[in-house]
Image: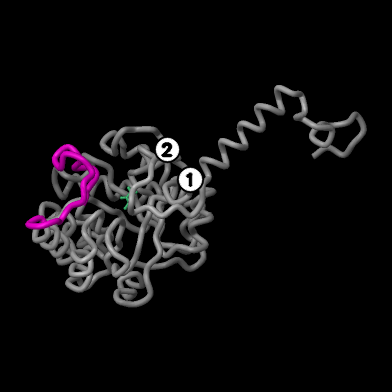
Amino acid sequence: MSATNRIKAATVPEIIARKGHDPLVCLTAYTTPIARITDGFCDIVLVGDSVGMVLHGLDDTLGVTLEMMIMHGRAVRRGVERALLVIDMPFASYEESPQQAFRNAARLMSETGADAVKLEGGIAMADTIRFLVARGIPVMGHVGLTPQAVNVLGGYAVQGRGEGADRVTLDARAVAEAGAFSVVLEKIPAPLADRITADLSVPTIGIGASAGCDGQILVVDDMLGMFADFRPKFVKRYADLAEQAEKAVEQYAQEVRARSFPAPEHVFKDQEKSQ
Ligand code: KIV
């Protein structure tokens, strides 16, 4: 479906207007089939750079490229008609200057049909966010734990504890004041997330934050249980697809070895309407 004949989709002003009202439902998606499922229930679908770890087996998000984001962004666009489609700017595609950020954000939007971009960082990214928004690119901010800064942070620990609370608060405020239409708060203490939510005039989207945020987001493969050994505290599993998939593959292997698959109903006869 082209960008011009999509059914009415969520808009950035509609998302902003949800501040303080019913929670925004957000999930990531990287493929068309999952995008179609999420679109039925979500207000925002994010093509996260988590795609590098989730689908490509990378150790972190630093190796994700603009080309990878564009490929997955196009796939997700084919499955999203009504949710707001946001796409992550990958590491090293925006930090150098507002001009670099504009060039790459414009590519992401025009080549995928995404409605907005997301980028990580607080005060240091405020000028860049202002520059993009003034030129027609809606930006979702992302503060607290920013996975692209894993090497500076020294890991994926909770951010904003003790004296760190002020830094996260100032980062969130700077991003919102620069014009971000919403701000992801990742892995910060719940009371801090509540205070930031009260402080900002745009919606906060929590992941490992607080039920008091204006919305929630999870990595879709995490909540579907695609990784048997990955069980962070902030992810609730709504399914155990990895377990089911393993059982299915095991049964298939047994049946092939026993020659019980394919059964008569799975093979074609000489005289039969073909399917
Ligand atoms: O890349 C991603 O999936 C994200 C979400 C976890 C917010 O940034």
Looking at the rendering, the stretch of residues picked out in magenta corresponds to 145-164
* Residue indicated by mark 2: 55
The amino acid type found where label 1 is placed reads Thr
Residue 195 locus on image (x, y percent) = 18, 70
Mark 1 or mark 2, which is nearer to you? 2
Q: Quadrant of residue 117?
A: bottom left
Secondary structure of the residue carrying tag 2 is loop
* Residue indicated by mark 1: 31
Residue 240 locus on image (x, y percent) = 51, 47
Front one among 229 and 123: 229
| Mark 1 or mark 2: whose residue is earlier in sequence | 1
Front one among 112 and 245: 245
Q: Residue at x 77, y 28 (%)?
A: 260
Based on the picture, tell me whether residue 152 belongs to the magenta stretch. yes
Q: Name the main secondary structure of what is drawn in magenta.
A: loop
Based on the picture, tell me whether residue 84 belongs to the magenta stretch. no
Front one among 154 and 31: 154
Under 8 Å from ligand 1: the CB of mark 2?
Answer: no
Secondary structure of the residue carrying tag 1 is loop
Asked if residue 183 lies left or right of residue 4, the reply is left
10 Å crowding of disc 1: few (<14), some (14-19), many (20+): many
* View extreme (right): residue: 271
Asked if residue 196 lies left or right of residue 22, the reply is left
Asked if residue 49 lies left or right of residue 261, the reply is left
